[in-house]
Amino acid sequence: MKHNKIFSSLLMAGCLLGVGSTAFAASCSNILGPVDNSNPAGPYVGNSCGNNAAFNGAATLCGGTSYSNFGTDVWQVNLAASQNFTFSVTSAAFTPDIALLSGSCADNAPCVNSLDYSSGTGTATTATYTGNAAGTYYVVITDSTATGAQCGAYNLSFAGTLPVKLQNFSIN
């Protein structure tokens, strides 16, 4: 009987620790796309202000930069096979930090590489990814500068090979 109480106490502590460790991850509340339809190159127009508010400065993006407290956009990209592609973000409103996450849409999801990409406001921020296995990926657009608007309107475009949705098929 005494061993059952100890085991139950350890099991309860383990469950509580497990719940506590996942509480720090924020999942996407707003996912755009997916980017794999009839216009895979884009451009796609977005505005990151107020989106995915749970992704904030407490969490870090690839390369160790913080998510904007003012908004982060996430676009879903579905790859049917291994693909190479480049995506770029241009904004006159904020300095975009961009990254590619795999597996899940959360502020602690694994990055495809360890770097994020950032450049000055009004210039294109571009990232190239090669050999991505089939699966679901998430393009993250945020601003970690802690100056200026830290969110706003932007254009997202892709180059390379992305899957295209079959629109029409017939056999005669």
Image (spheres, rainbow, N blue to C red):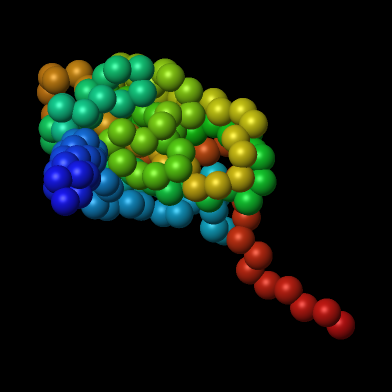
Q: Which residue appears farthest toward the bottom when viewing the image?
A: 172
Residue 158 sits above or below residue 97 on the image: below
The residue located at (27%, 31%) in the rendering is: 142
The residue located at (54%, 26%) in the rendering is: 128
Left or right, 146 with reference to 72 = left
The total of numbered circles placed on residues is: 0
Near-viewer residue (88 or 132): 132
Near-viewer residue (92 or 60): 60
Residue 34 sits above or below residue 47 on the image: below
Q: Quadrant of the C terminus?
A: bottom right
Left or right, 48 with reference to 155 = left
Say whether residue 143 is visible.
Answer: no
Residue 133 quadrant: top right
The residue located at (28%, 36%) in the rendering is: 107
The residue located at (16%, 51%) in the rendering is: 1
Left or right, 129 with reference to 9 = right
Say whether residue 28 is visible.
Answer: yes
Residue 25 quadrant: top left
Near-viewer residue (64 or 159): 64
